[in-house]
Image (cartoon, helix red, strand yellow):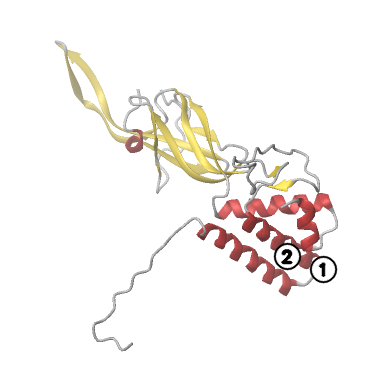
Amino acid sequence: MSYDTHKTWFFQTVGRNIHLWQYVESNATDTLAGIRISLPDEYYGKQLIYPDESITAGLRFEGTAFVEPFVSVDPNELNGSAEPTLTNQTSPDEADHVNLTRMLSLAVVDYLKAMVSDSSGDLEKKEYYMREFWKKVGDDQSNKRRNFNVFPISPFAIK
Amino acid sequence: MTVLEMMERSGMKNTTLTVAFIKDAIHLMQSQVDVHTATWKTDIADGTREYPFPANMIRLKSVSIKDTTDSKYKRIRRLTHSPVVSEDTDPE
């Protein structure tokens, strides 16, 4: 039975795999007159071991992923007052929508312009459009955040 | 925005190439920021330490292990150094 997993389990990334380690502080025990005692000669100490138990659906990954990149309807327009019903398009064509916000869609346009400039050998233009691409991606992210900058005002500040 | 509108705005002519570039752009974005996130779950086997990343995952955000005493997934930490044991041929 796993407990305090946030304290006793660790991971390592190795190529396309993850290695799981369990932290244990153990020694061999024996039961004497109904009382469990540790055997002093068989102390294993603190160590990292391979997972010591099977857990169904025990490992959970969270990450970014390709989730329906192309859909059949505009993902930024409400269907009346309801959220749009998005259907994944596995073989996208010109009529399909890119499943991104308007700002990220504009960023993708900049990326396409950068690729057009790249194929024509205009690297200066490519760099310009890539900067615009990342700027729009940043703008889209800042739409979700609200930061306040507070500066103390000196009592003798000249205004 | 439709694929056609993106082609017209950028001056791209080839639909297949445009779709490929759009996928590249999304991949690039997802490598840096959270546009679409997902979760995946897999079984842990006793004595097995190696598990592959989900095939369609782009950037790892967190790894959690199920605490079976309270049925909650708890985030685990990354090892800051490699363990002394590189392989355990008899983990049981």
**Residue A59 in picture, x, y percent from top left:** 47, 31
Q: Residues within 10 Å of mark 2 (few under 14, many from 20)?
A: many
Mark 2–mark 1 CB contact (< 8 Å): no
The residue that label 2 is drawn on is A114
Please tell me how crowded label 1 is: few (under 14), some (14-19), or many (20+) other residues with Cα within 10 Å.
few
Q: Is residue B57 above or below residue A36?
A: below
Q: Which of the marked residues, 2 or 1, is nearer the chain's N terminus?
A: 2
Residue A87 lies, with reference to residue A1, above or below; the image says below
Return the residue found at the far bottom: A158
Q: In the displayed image of the protein, which residue is found farthest to the front?
A: A80
Dot 1: element: loop
Estimate the x, y position of residue A110 in percent, counting from the top left. 70, 63
Describe residue A61's horizontal placement relative to residue B55 as left or right. left
Figure quadrant of residue A16:
top right
Pick whichever, B1 or A43, lies toward us: B1
Q: Residue furthest top?
A: A33
Nearest to the observer: residue A82 or residue B73: A82
Res A3 → quadrant? top left
The secondary structure type at the circle numbered 2 is helix
Image quarter in which the C terminus of chain B is found: top left
Image disc number at residue A120: 1
Q: Indicate the amino acid at tag 1.
A: Ser
What amino acid is found at the position of numbered circle 2 in the picture? Ala
